[in-house]
């Protein structure tokens, strides 16, 4: 595991962009394609905007990239809270990405059906029998330790067969669809992006309190053979004391 503490969200986003560019280039050279699963939330917005900016857009072979989502709210794709909409507006709409390479979770469907359709899409792309291997998964962490739409205490954390499941959240009352832990932990690279003072407590508990770590879905993310990198801004890292930190 690597932990990088960046001065602020801007520096964190540039670092994340450089990692995305680097991994996608290597992957496309090696395999001819790159499969990434992206998150919603406020933290990765700047990363998506930077990737489509003049500074970075020419560095990536967009036609060879396949976009998936780690989770989605069960709402129409044009809704302001849609994770598809976030990534589409900030990134996908500005780049030459073939429609077939955009694998959104259909939030407008009934949750069970949306999860099933997404699972079918994943199996179609990665192959029917093997557990999919994403080249990169970008994740965030909530103050309660959730990641993707995997929330503390949820039965979805016990899922061992399905790739995507529906989740119902009481507060706010909303259905969601999320990737499950086995597929997340099977990816080659995992990149956590965490910023802001409200995350300082949970970052400390997950990264420094070994016995508490597994209480939190984000603490259960541990790739079976891949690498995991945490990019944390100074405010979210302010309670870290012991970990081997790379200040960047
Ligand atoms: C979402 C996410 C979710 C998010 C965390 C952190 O759709 O909201 O996938 O897991 O990554 O809640 O969100 P912030 O980046 O806004 O802190």
Image (cartoon, rainbow, N blue to C red):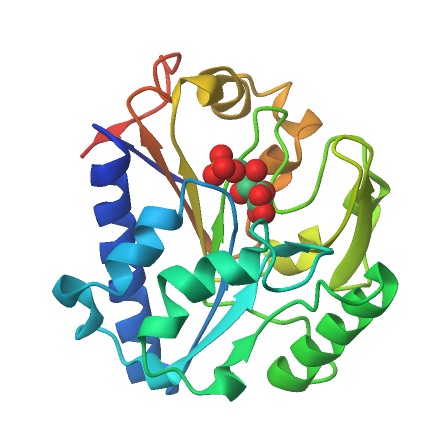
For the image shown, how many numbered marks are present on the structure?
A: 0
Which residue is drawn at the image coordinates 66% and 76% (left, top)? 122
Which residue is drawn at the image coordinates 23% and 39% (left, top)? 10
| Residue 136 appears in view | no
Q: Residue placed farthest to the left in the image?
A: 55
**In this image, 163 relative to 98: left or right?**
right
Looking at this view, is 1 or 193 the one in front? 193
Looking at this view, is 190 or 76 the one in front? 76
Which residue is drawn at the image coordinates 65% and 60% (left, top)? 183
Looking at this view, is 208 or 7 the one in front? 7
Residue 7 placement (x, y as % from top left)? 20, 28
Residue 246 placement (x, y as % from top left)? 24, 31
**In this image, 118 relative to 82: left or right?**
right
Query: Which quadrant of the view contains residue 87?
Result: bottom left
Which residue is drawn at the image coordinates 72% and 36% (left, top)? 151
Taking the image as four quarters, which one is ligand 1 found in? top right
**In this image, 177 relative to 5: left or right?**
right
Residue 163 placement (x, y as % from top left)? 74, 64
Quarter of the image for the C terminus: give it.
Answer: top left
> Does residue 52 sit above or below 122 in this rendering?
above
> Does residue 114 sit above or below 207 in this rendering?
below
Quarter of the image for the N terminus: give it.
Answer: top left
């Amino acid at each position: 595991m690597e932990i990088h503490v960046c001065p602020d969200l801007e520096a964190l986003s540039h670092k994340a962009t450089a990692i995305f560019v680097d991994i996608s280039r290597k992957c496309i050279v090696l395999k001819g394609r790159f499969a990434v699963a992206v998150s919603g939330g406020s933290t990765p917005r700047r990363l998506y905007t930077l990737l489509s900016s003049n500074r970075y857009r020419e560095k990536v072979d967009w036609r060879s990239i396949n976009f998936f989502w780690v989770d989605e709210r069960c709402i129409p794709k044009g809704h302001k809270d849609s994770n598809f909409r976030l990534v589409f507006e900030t990134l996908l709409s500005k780049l030459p990405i073939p429609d077939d390479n955009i694998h959104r979770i259909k939030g407008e469907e009934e949750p069970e059906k949306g999860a099933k359709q997404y699972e079918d899409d994943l199996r179609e792309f990665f192959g029917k029998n093997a557990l999919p291997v994403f080249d990169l998964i970008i994740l965030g962490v909530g103050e309660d330790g959730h990641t993707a739409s995997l929330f503390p205490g949820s039965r979805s954390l016990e899922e061992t067969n399905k790739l995507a499941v529906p989740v119902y959240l009481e507060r706010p009352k909303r259905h969601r669809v999320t990737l499950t832990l086995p597929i997340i932990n099977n990816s080659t690279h995992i990149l956590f992006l965490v910023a802001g003072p409200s995350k300082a407590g949970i970052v400390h508990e997950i990264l420094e309190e070994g016995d508490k770590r597994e209480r939190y879905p984000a603490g259960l993310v541990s790739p079976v053979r891949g690498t995991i990198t945490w990019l944390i801004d100074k405010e979210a890292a302010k309670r870290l004391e012991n970990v081997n930190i790379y200040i960047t």
